[in-house]
Image (cartoon, rainbow, N blue to C red):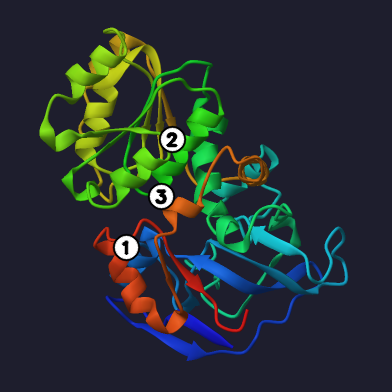
Amino acid sequence: MKALVKTASGKGNIELQERPCPTPGKDDVLIKVNRAGVCGTDVHIEHDRFANSPPVTLGHEFSGTIEQIGVNVTGFSKGDRVVSSNNPFACGQCDLCRAGNPNLCLDKRAMGIHSDGCFADYVKLESTLIHKIPDNVTFEQAALTEPLAVAVQAVAHNCGIEDGDTVVVFGAGAIGLLAAQVARAEGAGQVIVVGTSRDEKVRFPCARGLGLYTINVEKGGLVDEILKLTKNRGADVVVEASGNAAAIQQGSRLLKRTGRMAISGITGKPDVAVDWDHLVSKGVMLHFCYGSVNADWEKGLQYLSEGKVLTQPLITHQFNLEQWHEAFRSLESLDAIRPVFEIEGT
């Protein structure tokens, strides 16, 4: 089968190779990949800015069809349309797993990063990770269930939304746009997406098409505008999905007293300055969010089925695996929100 492989550590070292088709174990399913989304993490792995375990097939967000099932697998059949959460090899026995946090398990080996992923004709995964796609959701829409589940984990699972909340989302990429939609689906009133001039070409028009209010932070007046929109109270919830240190500082400043902040952006820096005493004096709650769990996938798929969250507008480009370099560059240049591979032969 064809597979896009990070062959060795260091910048680059990505090749489209012929690799053996994986054989499912007794508790596994073999999935024929239909669509696979390209994430910023994949680009970071290309540049060796994100820890990975080569040689490894890249890719961690996809949709596909079950081709084979292991002898111990129940509840699934060949031909089922599915997606998979990204917690392979979580032990299931440690305190974190038993508390319902396999996403934080020290034994977890995320697919496409530390275990073989979905930028291939086939991927093998544990059946406990698998979720059926609702009948009224397409392969293409379902391909972005992974970033949607990450948004659900941050906004709905960890931070929580109360009816009528004013929510400010920093970051107009896929996670930010999905987090904004999840906040609205959870009952938020006004939802504002904050970005930069680089977002004006593609991301902001998409956000506005989704009915979201946008603010370009580089044009100034962010704090005044948020205070005006909230009658000087500040935001009930801030979602930090950009990984930008300045956004973390600004977001924490925008919170009302007793406000909540969901933080999922990775900065890549060892230290980020915040006005700690200011946060303490306002009694805010900070929620640091990483990955997702099965319940987030089920809620995300429900939102897709009900039309409360839309992924299709975020899929701005489609490529085949041979065009991986163009796909990566389209994401890196912000010409694309989410490029998606249409895996050949499906």
Left or right of 147 in this view: 93: right
Residue 203 percent across, percent down from the top left: 31, 48
**Who is closer to the viewer here, 307 or 18?**
307
- Mark 2 Cα-neighbour bin, 10 Å: few <14, some 14–19, many ≥20: many
Give the residue pinned by disc 1. 331
The image quadrant of residue 34 is: bottom right
Query: Which residue lies at the image location 65% right of the left edge and 54% below the top edge?
Result: 137
Q: Is residue 40 above or below residue 171?
A: below
Left or right of 228 in this view: 32: right
**Who is closer to the viewer here, 75 or 231?**
231
Mark 1 lies on a secondary structure that is helix
Disc ID at residue 174: 3
Q: Are marks 2 and 1 in contact (CB under 8 Å)?
A: no
Residue 167 percent across, percent down from the top left: 39, 24
Give the residue pinned by disc 2. 180
Q: Is residue 106 above or below residue 260?
A: below
